Amino acid sequence: MRVGDVYIDALGTWLPASYSAERAVREGLYEAVDFEENGLLGTRVAGPEEAPAEMALRAVRQLAGRRGGDLSDVDLLVHAGGSWQGPEGWRPASYIQRHTVGGTGPAWELRMGCLGGLTAMEVAVGFLRGDDSRRTVLFTTADNWSSPVVDRWRSFPGVILGDGASALTLGKRPGFARLLSVNTGGVPDLEGMYRGSEPLFPGTSLQRPPIDFRMRATAYKEVDSTSSEAMMLSAKVQLELIDRSLEEAGIGRGDITRVIYVNYSRMATQMWLLDPLGIPMSTSTWEIGRHIGHIGPSDQLVSMDRLLEQGALSPGDHLLLAGLGPGMTLGSAVLEIVSPPAWTA
C-alpha cells in the first residue's frame, strides 16, 4: 500500500531490567550451545505480576510527554500483544483506552503476534483514510513472558523472549517520520508450525507443561510433507513484500539507511532477511536487539526509539521495517525521517 500522507509524531517505550544471557547460562536457564551460536547477549525481564496493560500505560505516558501531553486528537486505539494479556473475556485495549485517551471512540485488539506493529500501521492507514475527520491512531503493544507455560530461554529456536511495551501515534499531522508504504501477507500452509500436535480446542491452560515451539515445529514437519516448500515460499513472500514496499516508496534496496527486523539470532537475521536483500549486518539494528530480547510487536518500535535517542537518524534517511508472526504472516514498511523529534535534542 502506497501511503505518504500518514506520519509518526511520537513514540514511547518501557523496558524492565536487563537479564544477561551469560547469567542465564550459569543458572542453567539457557543452553550454552545456544548462547554461542545465537550471539544474543540478554533480554529484559518484568516481574511475574507486571500486567502487560499496565506496561503499555507506561509507554503511553512517555509518548504523551513527548508530544506535549495532549492525546485529545486520538480517534482510535489499537493494542497488540503476543503473550497472555489478562483474564479471559477481558479486553486490554479498552483498559488502556480508559486510562489514557478516554472518550467514546473505538478500541481494537489485534491478535497478530509479532507482526502486530506492522499490521497496526496498515490498519491505521485504512482507518484514517476512511473519514476526513479522523486525525490520529494510538497503537500500543506490551508483553510479559513471565508465565509458567512459557520458557523465555528455550521456547523458540534462535530467540530469547523479552518483556516490554511501546506506543506510537500515527496521524495526518506532520511528524518526525513519514510512512511511505506498508504491506502485509501470509503463508497459511505454515500455521501448523506454531500448532504442532496441539488440539485446536481447548487451548493450553496454566496447569499444562510449558509451551515448546521447537517441538511444535518438529511435529509439524513430521506430519506435513510440504513444510520445506512452505518455508521457502515464506522467504519469497517476505522479499516480494519488501520490494513492493520499496517500489511504492520510490526507492531501491541501495537507498535503505537502516533495516529494523525482529530480534532474532545473528544467523536467522542474516539467512532470512539480510543476505537475500544483499544488505550488510551493519545496516541492521541487530546490535540493539541482541541486548533486548524478542519483545513481540515491540521489536521494531523499540529499536527505532533507540536509533532516535542515539542520534543515528537524519532527515531523508529511509528505514525498512520487516517482520513476521504466527500464521505465518509477514510484513514490511518504509519510513522516511522528516526531522529528528524534539525529545532527542
Image (cartoon, grey):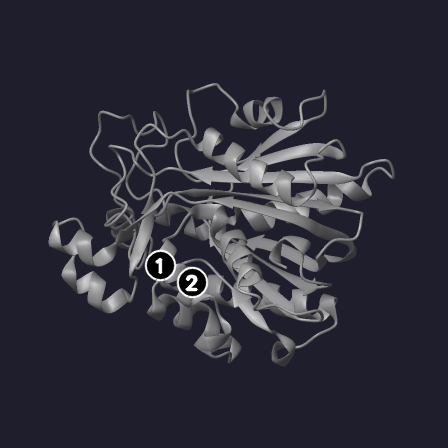
Residue located 34% across and 47% down the image:
44
- Is 77 on the left or on the right of 33, as rendered? right
Residue 142: image tag: none
Q: Which percent across, then down, holds residue 300? A: 52, 55
Q: Is residue 160 visible?
A: no
Q: Residue 117: x percent and y percent?
A: 56, 48
For the point 72% across and 35% down, which residue is it? 70
Which picture quadrant has residue 232? bottom left
**In the image: residue 238, left or right of residue 5:** left
Amino acid carrying mark 1 in the image:
His
Tell me, yes or no, if residue 308 can be seen here: yes
Out of 108 and 329, give the one closest to the viewer.
108
Cα separation, mark 2 vs mark 1, equals 6 Å
Specify few, some or many for label 1: CA neighbours under 10 Å numbering under 14, 14-19, or 20 or more. many
Q: Relative to 9, does residue 91 appear above or below in the rendering?
A: above
Residues under numbered marks 2 and 1 in contact, where contact means CB atoms less than 8 Å apart: yes
Q: Element at badge 2? A: helix
Q: Secondary structure at mark 1?
A: helix
Could you say which quadrant of the image residue 270 lies in?
Answer: bottom left
Q: Is residue 85 above or below residue 259?
A: above
Quarter that holds the C terminus: bottom right
Q: Is residue 287 above or below residue 201?
A: below
Across and down, in percent, residue 339 comes to 72, 63
Q: Residue at 67% across / 28% down in the picture?
A: 101
Give the residue at mark 1. Answer: 291
Q: Which of the image's four quarters has the N terminus?
A: bottom right
Question: Of the residues shown, which amino acid type is indicated by label 2?
Answer: Ile
Q: Nearer the viewer, residue 36 or 253?
A: 36
The residue that appears at 46% across and 34% down in the rendered structure is 55
Q: Which residue is mark 2?
A: 288
Where does the image place residue 33, in percent across and percent down from the top left? 16, 64
